């Protein structure tokens, strides 16, 4: 594939740089040039002729530094997870890396965004702000999802079991609830610790940036977009949900739950 060639796969565009959605291609333009950091005035005054260009180049590197980098989930490819093929995981990881790339692009474009004529129907600033929430949430939710894969499934123990039993009656009932939720939603199921209500909650998202819960710490994240399972199961989402349950890493969920004990809970969590 040449640098100019693009391959359309469903709603995704495969380029030499990775996978991006056709929606992203339509909504976002090329990366705007980032501003060059100012050079120390005293150094500029004495060394402008000799080192001005080098200083400017160094400043540009600092100014354009990307805040996000893709996490390494490659171990999932070779883990031989039951029901989730290496090919399925590889393609999914390419999609995730595309969100990381776009998150960095939008971050840098916002530094020099056009602030003239801001408008709620359409303006460049509006589109950048809106698509930043789509790209960044797409990146972060995928990291939670891949992070809680690669386990041996089964039943949780300890504090996780106690919390699920309290909220859903039993871990068995929770798994039924999780799978039913996975069949309801078009994008994500987020099971998290609600710091405002001081309990576990489940939220459903149709898109990365639609109905994303606030004051909720993700404990278990399930991706139900078709790209998460179509290579292995076509449109049979139920089989994918069974496979997800078999590979769920409850130890990671427990680690996330333990971290919530350091947070402020209840009404004070929104101060």
Image (cartoon, rainbow, N blue to C red):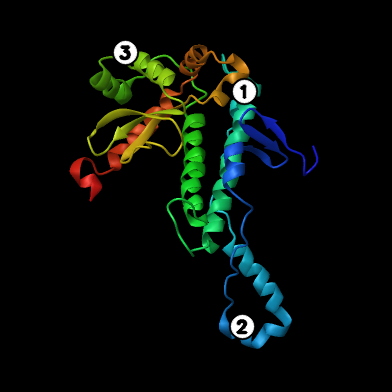
Q: What element carries label 1?
A: helix
Q: Mark 1 to mark 2: distance in Å?
A: 54 Å
Nearer to us: label 1 or label 2:
1
Q: Which residue is drawn at 44% across and 56% down?
A: 119
> 261 left or right of 55?
left
Q: What element carries label 3?
A: helix
Count numbered badges in the picture: 3
Q: Which residue is drawn at 64% across and 22% down?
A: 86
Residues packed near mark 1 inside 10 Å, few (<14), some (14 to 19) or many (20 plus): some
Residue 88's disc is 1
> 205 left or right of 17?
left
Q: What element carries label 2?
A: helix
Residues packed near mark 3 inside 10 Å, few (<14), some (14 to 19) or many (20 plus): few
Counting residues from the start of the chain, the first of labels 1 and 2 encountered is 2
Nearer to us: label 2 or label 3:
3
Cβ atoms under marks 1 and 2 closer than 8 Å: no
Residue 173's disc is 3
Q: Where is residue 183 in the image (x, y as percent from the top left)?
A: 43, 18
Q: Can residue 72 be seen in this view?
A: no
Q: Mark 3 to mark 1: distance in Å?
A: 28 Å
Residue 209's disc is none
Q: Where is residue 229 in the image (x, y as percent from the top left)?
A: 56, 20
**Residue 249 figure quarter:** top left
Q: Position of residue 17 (x, y in %)?
A: 69, 42
Quick one: which residue is furthest to the left in this view? 267
> 54 left or right of 213?
right
When the figure is inspected, residue 215 is found, relative to residue 167, above or below; the finding is below
Q: Mark 2 to mark 3: distance in Å?
A: 68 Å
Q: Kindly identify which residue carries mark 2.
A: 43
Counting residues from the start of the chain, the first of labels 2 and 3 encountered is 2
Quick one: which residue is furthest to the right in this view? 2
């Amino acid at each position: 594939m040449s640098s100019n060639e693009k391959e359309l796969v469903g709603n995704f565009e495969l380029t030499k740089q990775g996978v991006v959605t056709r929606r992203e291609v339509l909504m976002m333009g090329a990366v705007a040039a980032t501003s060059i950091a100012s050079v120390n005035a005293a150094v500029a005054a004495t060394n402008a002729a000799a080192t001005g260009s080098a200083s400017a180049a160094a400043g540009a590197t600092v100014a354009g530094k990307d805040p996000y980098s893709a996490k390494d989930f490659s171990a999932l490819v070779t883990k031989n997870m039951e029901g989730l093929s290496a090919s399925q995981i590889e393609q999914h990881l390419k999609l995730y890396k595309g969100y990381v790339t776009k998150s960095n692009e939008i971050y840098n474009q916002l530094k020099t965004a056009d602030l003239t004529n801001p408008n709620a129907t359409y303006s460049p600033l509006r589109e950048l702000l809106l698509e930043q929430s789509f790209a960044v949430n797409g990146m972060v939710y995928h990291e939670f999802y891949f992070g809680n894969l690669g386990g041996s499934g089964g039943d949780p123990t300890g504090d996780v079991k106690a919390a699920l039993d309290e909220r859903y009656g039993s871990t068995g009932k929770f798994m039924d609830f999780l799978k039913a939720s996975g069949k309801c939603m078009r994008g994500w199921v987020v099971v998290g610790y609600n710091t405002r209500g001081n309990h576990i909650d489940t939220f459903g998202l149709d898109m990365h940036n639609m109905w994303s819960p606030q004051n909720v710490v993700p404990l278990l994240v399930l991706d139900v977009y078709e790209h998460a399972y179509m290579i292995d199961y076509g449109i049979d989402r139920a089989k994918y949900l069974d496979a997800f349950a078999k590979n769920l890493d409850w130890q990671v969920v427990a680690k996330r739950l333990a971290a919530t004990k350091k947070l402020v809970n209840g009404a004070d969590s929104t101060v």
